[in-house]
Image (cartoon, coloured by chain):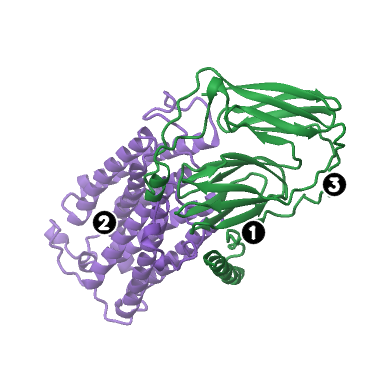
Chain colours: A green, B purple
Amino acid sequence: MIINGWEMYMRRVCRVAVVVGMVLLPGAVVACGGGTQESGPSEASAPVTNPVDPATAGNVTGRVMFEGTPPKPSALRMDSDPNCVQQGASATDESVIVGEGGAVQNVFVYVKDGLGSLRFPVPSAPVVLDQKGCRYAPHVLGAQVGQPVEVLNSDPTLHNVHAVPAANQEFNTGQPLPGMKHTHRFSTREVMVPFKCDVHPWMRAYIGVLDHPYFGVTGADGTFRLNGLPPGTYTIEAWHETLGSQTQTVTIGANESRDIAFSLKSTT
Amino acid sequence: MLLHLFAAFVAAATALLIFAGGLVTSTESGLSVPDWPTTYGWFMFTFPLDKMVGGIRYEHSHRLIASVVGFLILVLAVWLWRAEPRRWVRRLGYVALGAVVTQGILGGITVLWFLPDPISIAHAGLAQLVFCLTLSIALATSPGWHRGYPVGNRTLRIIALVTTVVTYVQILVGATMRHTGAGLAIPDFPFAFGRLVPPAWSAPIAIHYAHRVGALVVTVLVLATAGHILYHHRTRGELRRPALLLLAMLSVQLTLGALTVLTGKQYVVNSLHVVAGAVVLGTSLVLTLRAHRPRIEGSGLGAQGSRFRNPLSPIPDPGSRIPELRGMGA
């Protein structure tokens, strides 16, 4: 009830802002965040059915490893908000997470090229980006163009959700109350869309927005899996927020599974 | 006298507001409150204090101080309208009011449009003009101004005016550097990548280097102005005092500029650099206005449109050390 009340209030504020904006400030209402947003005309007029024949589909699996001595994760200073200190006193920086044996976590791996003109259905189920312990969870994720991206506030403090894409439309909306939800649909593919919270400057997340479902994010063991690919030759890219990107070309036949490996090293 | 004290208070409050604005930029908190004029949906003055966390502390405090300064300038403008006999001073009040309202709208737009550089730079530039306007009103309503000053020479008038204008341009270059993220484009000081001239160029490096060259130009102009005053007008307290203050503030400002780079833009140092720039500009403006005062009041601007008795009278200036020149400019 509180959430609905707040959203209704925000909508009322935005309606007033629209009227004032039409008189004084054309365009000033761009940033008014309601409960749901779409960034511009959607490219997501996709067919309902999957064009890939499951009988011939193959997979690409692999692992991303760190080359060299991995950096030690530094502790995050979250003392600018007492609520955050209580939530995550031992939180560490997530910009490079290297696990056992040099496995790199939070690498976005996706099919960059090779799908031609194939169009894919847009999932109606949302991907969820949670704000918990004054950090984004997950830190890296993927979504399809037009798919709902649901940003939650599970913290007892307030956050602003600020997406700073290059190709999609930027937005910045407030979530002052715990449990608030903001849904957004991206209109065009973009790898990656950074998210940040300006209240808590250590909070960063990245969403890869694609027009197909062939993407994944490495877990603690550094592995990824792209399932259901039609036979063909593909450019696979591994993207990391600080270690940069690498691409590989891989060809898979009908029902074939290929395993590839990426090796990333510090660029500094 | 009360009006002068109030105007001086408003000018000081405006300087504080500039410092608060500097903190917002230095801590990159400009978008920590995504809505405007509300704050996370709350009416600005009812936003709960316990929610003032992280970057919101800087952004929301800046908005609150700005509201207070806006109100103070409104009071000042009304006060001038009701009590000030000189039309040009009343007009300064109206212009200050219009400027602070515009400044508030620019501040709102820059939040709603995600800090576009031109708007943010305009917001920073107009802040300095609001400060200059309030300072000018404080000066024009001061007892010293009413008493009048001796007629200065042409050289002083020109050099003081040029120093003030160039200082303002330098502040605009600094604002451009700040808002385009070029503050550490040249990471070393006093050299640029170990050399006098950067070995490679990009837009951020060019903007940063222009600010350093601008600092040199301002330094030369301030030294010329202060040197001229201390050599030719040493006995005139109304010029000597701001000249010495200008030299002191220039030293502080250059030190803060160097420290801003050397500390990697430590936010308090960075913000002090912004407000010290305003003080340098304001001091230079006071010198300029005092040097031009006989022309300003003597041009008839003060008398024309006056609804009241012209209060300007050649009362001797106790601060002056040249008795034979006292009051000649009135």
Alpha carbon distance from label 3 to label 2 = 86 Å
Q: Chain of mark 3?
A: A
Q: Provide residue B78's location: percent of width, then percent of height.
A: 35, 76
Q: Residue B75 vs residue A63: left or right? A: left
Q: Is residue B125 above or below residue A207?
A: below
Q: Which residue is mark 1?
A: A36
Q: Is residue B60 above or below residue B309?
A: above
Q: Residues within 10 Å of mark 2 (few under 14, many from 20)?
A: some
Task: Please say if the residues under marks 1 and 2 sit with CB atoms less than 8 Å apart.
Answer: no
Alpha carbon distance from label 1 to label 2 = 65 Å
Task: Please say if the residues under marks 1 and 3 sit with CB atoms less than 8 Å apart.
Answer: no
Element marked by disc 3? loop
Q: Is residue B69 above or below residue B186?
A: below
Q: Residue at x 68, y 25 (%)?
A: A62
Element marked by disc 2? loop
Which of the two discs, 1 and 2, sits closer to the camera?
A: 1
Q: What residue type is disc 2 on?
A: Gly
Q: Which residue is mark 2?
A: B152
Q: What residue type is disc 1 on?
A: Thr
Query: Closest to the observer: A213 or B149?
Result: A213
Which of the two discs, 3 and 2, sits closer to the camera?
A: 3
Q: Residues within 10 Å of mark 3 (few under 14, many from 20)?
A: few
Q: Which residue is mark 3?
A: A49
Q: Residues within 10 Å of mark 1 (few under 14, many from 20)?
A: few
Q: Provide residue B106's location: percent of width, then percent of height.
A: 49, 60
Label located before the other in sequence (1 or 3): 1
Alpha carbon distance from label 1 to label 3 = 26 Å
Q: Is residue B311 above or below residue B36?
A: below
